[in-house]
Image (cartoon, rainbow, N blue to C red):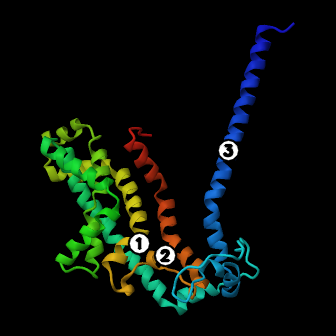
């Protein structure tokens, strides 16, 4: 006859087995989901080592156009391949050494994004500190306006941005991209939420000790928001690294377009370079994400009210 201890041990064993099965099932589901999300990246990377003739034979139908420049219905079967028949570095040699225009567009992207990230964080930090200190009705109304602007899709504000840029005579210049990006409300909204979570007693103690507003801002508020600043910087970088509409509307000179615009306008004459250019385009965002992943997670969790 089983004793009470034996029944408890059996129940614990069953619960442990059930937990292990649940964990195993969830792990399998997450592994499959991760593989599905990684397939496009793996597909792009492996296909970047294909020869131009193999790419044309496998995917030429996707980029086929009519004589008038329109797209045609794909009646042929597209051959998706993860392993090239012959590994070659021809695409990278062409992109990096024989076609400097692609590298110029890559550096155009860097030239646009780097100032936007730096100065948007600077402007947002000052504005967020002002919104978080001594809250009043006027500040709340202005902050609500920031939220409304942030919720608007960029396509809604694209025409006003163009009209303002034309009025300022900065169309077809770098400033047409920089100014709207630097004063974007996205970073102000998020950073204000971070700074409002700083205990007011900490700031008041610094004030009692004789610290001025600039000292409180630079030596207390900013260091406490380091995780938030890093996570916001990553999000801003990814957002503007992938911009397409802004340069197409505000920049008439195609030599000033970033690499993201080129990727959206690949035509039949350049499909042999598509995968190599895409890999080069992905390298910098991936490195920044991998380097700042902990800051990004910390910033997101702290924004939600959980500080690990």
Instruction: Please provide percent x and percent y for residue 125.
Output: 25, 55
Give how far apart the Cα atoms at labels 3 and 2 are: 36 Å
Q: Quadrant of the N terminus?
A: top right
Residue 149 seen: yes
Circle nearer the viewer, 3 or 2? 2
Which image quarter holds the C terminus?
top left
Q: Disc 2 on helix, strand or loop?
A: helix
Tell me which residue sits at (28%, 82%) in the image. Answer: 172
The residue sitting at the bottom extreme is 98
Q: Earlier in the sequence, mark 3 or mark 1?
A: 3
Local crowd size for mark 2, using a 10 Å CA cut-off: few (<14), some (14–19), many (≥20): few
Residue on which the image places disc 1: 244
- Residue 133 vs residue 79: left or right? left
In-image side of 81 versus 117 (left or right): right
Which is more N-terminal, label 1 or label 2? Answer: 1
Q: Position of residue 248 (x, y in %)?
A: 37, 77
Callout 2 touching callout 1 (CB < 8 Å): yes
Mark seen at residue 223? none
Per the model, the C-alpha gap separating discs 2 and 1 is 8 Å
Q: Is residue 301 above or below residue 7?
A: below
Which label belongs to residue 264? 2
Location of residue 126 in the rendering, given as x and y in whole percent from the top left corner: 21, 55
**Corner quadrant of residue 26:** top right
Is label 3 or label 1 in front?
1
Residue at 26% x, 37% y is 199
Return the x and y of residue 37 as percentages of the image width and height: 61, 58
Which residue is disc 3 drawn over? 27
Bin the neighbour count of mark 3 within 10 Å (Cα to Cα): few under 14, some 14-19, many 20 and up: few
């Amino acid at each position: 006859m089983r004793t009470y201890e034996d029944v408890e041990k059996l129940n614990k064993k069953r619960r442990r087995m059930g937990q292990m099965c649940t964990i195993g099932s969830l792990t399998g589901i997450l592994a499959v989901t991760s593989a599905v999300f990684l397939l496009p990246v793996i597909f792009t990377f492996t296909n970047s080592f294909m020869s131009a003739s193999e790419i044309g034979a496998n995917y030429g139908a996707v980029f086929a156009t009519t004589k008038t420049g329109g797209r045609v219905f794909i009646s042929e079967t597209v051959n998706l391949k993860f392993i090239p028949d012959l590994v070659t570095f021809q695409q990278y040699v062409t992109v990096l050494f024989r076609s400097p225009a692609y590298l110029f567009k890559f550096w155009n992207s860097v030239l646009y994004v780097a100032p936007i990230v730096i100065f948007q964080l600077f402007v947002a930090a000052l504005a967020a500190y002002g919104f978080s200190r001594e809250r009043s009705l006027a500040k709340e109304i202005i902050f609500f306006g920031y939220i409304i602007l942030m919720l608007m899709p960029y396509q809604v504000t694209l025409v006003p941005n163009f009209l303002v840029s034309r009025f300022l005579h900065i169309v077809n210049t770098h400033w047409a991209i920089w100014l709207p990006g630097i004063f974007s409300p996205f970073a102000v909204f998020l950073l204000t939420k971070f700074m409002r979570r700083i205990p007011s007693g900490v700031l008041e103690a610094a004030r009692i000790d004789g610290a001025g507003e600039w000292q409180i801002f630079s030596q207390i508020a900013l260091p406490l928001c380091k995780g938030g600043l890093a996570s916001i910087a990553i999000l801003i970088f990814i957002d503007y690294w992938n911009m397409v509409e802004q340069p197409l509307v505000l920049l008439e000179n195609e030599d000033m377009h970033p690499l993201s615009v080129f990727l959206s306008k690949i035509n039949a004459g350049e499909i042999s370079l598509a995968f190599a250019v895409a890999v080069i385009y992905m390298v910098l965002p991936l490195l920044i994400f991998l380097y700042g992943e902990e800051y990004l997670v910390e910033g997101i969790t702290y924004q939600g009210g959980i500080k690990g």
